[in-house]
Amino acid sequence: MKNSLVNLKTIGLLIGAFFSAAIIAGCDNYRIPLEVRRSLKAAGQNRGELMAVINHFKDDSEKLQAAYYLISNMPGHYYIGGQCVFDPAFDQIKPILEKTGRTEGNGVIFTKLIDSIRFNNRDAFTVEEDIKTIRSDYLIENIDLAFMAYYSIPADLRCERETFLKFVLPYRNSREPIEPGLRKYFFQEYHWVFERMQQYDSFKNVICDLLDSIDIRMRRTFEYPFVIPLSNSYKIGVGNCDDIVNLAVFIFRALGIPAASDYIPFWGTGASIRNTGHTWIAFFIGDTIYAVDTNSNQIRNHLYRHEVLPKIYRRCFEKNKTECFFPNSIDVTNQYRNTIDIPLNSNKRISKAYLNLFHPVREWVPVDESRRKRGKIVFKDVGKNIVYAISDALNNKTKVINSPFYVNNKREIIELIPDHDKTITAILTRKYPPYVIRNLNKLRWVNSINGAEIQASNKTDFSDAVTLLKIKDFNSSNKQIIKTGNKEKYKNYRLVSAGSSEIHLSEFHLMKNDTIIMTDLQVFSTWNQRLHGDSHKLVDNRPLTYINARYLTVNYYFDEPVAISEFQIQARNDDNNVKPGCHYELMYWDDGWVSAGSKYANDTLLVYENIPSGALYWLRNRTEGIEEQIFLLDDKGYQYWPGVTSFNDSYHEFLELERLCNN
């Protein structure tokens, strides 16, 4: 019986070898490239599916080359199988989103659903390698549809062949599950795009309308353990930046429009526990690359020329042909901004080094790597206005092998070495930059207070209102005491926002003899009539609660007339100012973080005397908060935030983001 089983096994192997030889023999008239043959070997038992694709296109050289491209670059691509167990969560959250909107609160509900399902299905998930699982009919349809879409675009708008292979043909953009029929669905669903193009409508206008029709929004609270299946992203129209860009890229490619995910692994400023970088869609019209934020459809090319971006990468289906820190990615930093090459200056002889950014929890996180070539290690195309540190890998831990350094806008590399012989008095007001270039909202929050009026009246409808003061030159995110000089007694006081402009208000108190006076308070806005229930936010002494509205009035009512001349106001803010009562510790880098002393704040600024100059500094709030960032000190001891302090105010209007099209 044992010999019979052996014989059957031998016969089976011979039959398999015969058919494999027959398949290969049938391919003699079109020589299979070496990289494709390597992929066929890696496919194992799935080799027959891939050979079926090659045989299918053997008489169509154009599509055969496309098949070769996909198969040769397929190893390394995979997705997590078993995600169908999450489908009920998407079905359950969809009507909630339709009824109450794609809010952060609904994201919390969604995440709880996902976490519950994941906990109960811990063994349901498997790694599915494309090379070993992909089916021939799926790959054939993908190739046919890619060419169909490509030739549906007017000839003068079609991309070059290389661009087509890289950014139209691929059946996946990230690690999303393979979903048969999805490319065909989007090709048909958005077929109007081709009709608009044939009518010689502006390609830019068509793209803008396409993004608007996809209608996807970014919400950080929608957490998912893997890459969301594209059909589910499309179903709920919300996710993190990776997920919504992934969907947009797939739809663009289904329509023959070359597109990719461009991303930064970490921002150069504004490091926080939640700082995980950002992803946006990059698509190509002729020789022009458009970087568009899919959450707002804003063009970001110009913004990113000024933003503090250490490294930018483009996700590709193709294997890395050049050295790159991330797999299936190419470095495109120099396509967005002027860069600099940074050589490693170290006495240590190492074969590979890493370029790092500061992180408040991990201390240093790598964003690039470089190997020794011709006796040197050089990091190519690095962003400016950023503090970096270089490390090597020792026992899987990041170890900085030189002093951190600042690359300024003049392309100068300044080593940050503490000078203990030349000390300085540090005057500290914040633990985090006051704003970041990519988001100037924090400046707008403060500026929104300007133009508002403080009024007084003896009638509850304020028909006899007297203006005590029109606020101007308001430029602080701290609480501010505004003195009007009023000596008259009135029964009612109010704050009125400036015209139709939106005001962002965190606190508004009446004061007398340096004491807050509490009385009846009401909030009104014809722009948002639901604000009447939010009046407590303006008197709760919590900087992170706020009201933002147009046509806002904040009314205080007394039973008897009273003279009020002082008002305490705070604009909406990030609560990263130095706060009285909080415990702080100042650190500086000297071959590791060294404490310069800890103290409790008695005011909105901290003063540290006899601090080594020329170093890299880090202010820790040991009481509360999570956002912290490194900084420098200028000659007078004031904080200098790399990439922010040097940002010229004249850029603000210049950097107002334009939409892809304005219709």
Image: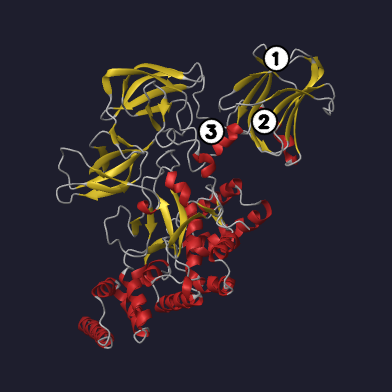
Of discs 2 and 3, which sits in the foreground?
2
Q: In this figure, which colouring scheme has been used for the structure?
A: secondary structure
Inspect the image, locate mark 3, and give the three-letter code of the amino acid beneath it. Answer: Asp
Q: What separation in Å lies between label 2 and label 3 (alpha carbons)? A: 22 Å
Closer to the camera in the image, 620 or 508: 508
Residue beneath disc 3: 574
Is residue 573 visible in this depiction of the protein?
yes
Give residue 602's position: percent from left, percent from top.
50, 16
Q: Which mark is residue 485?
A: 1
Q: Earlier in the sequence, mark 2 or mark 3?
A: 2
Q: Give SS at disc 2.
A: loop
Amino acid type at circle 1 is Gly
Sequence order check, earlier mark of 1 and 2: 2
Q: In the image, is 303 to the left or to the right of 530?
A: left
- Residue 451: mark in rendering: 2
SS under mark 1 = loop
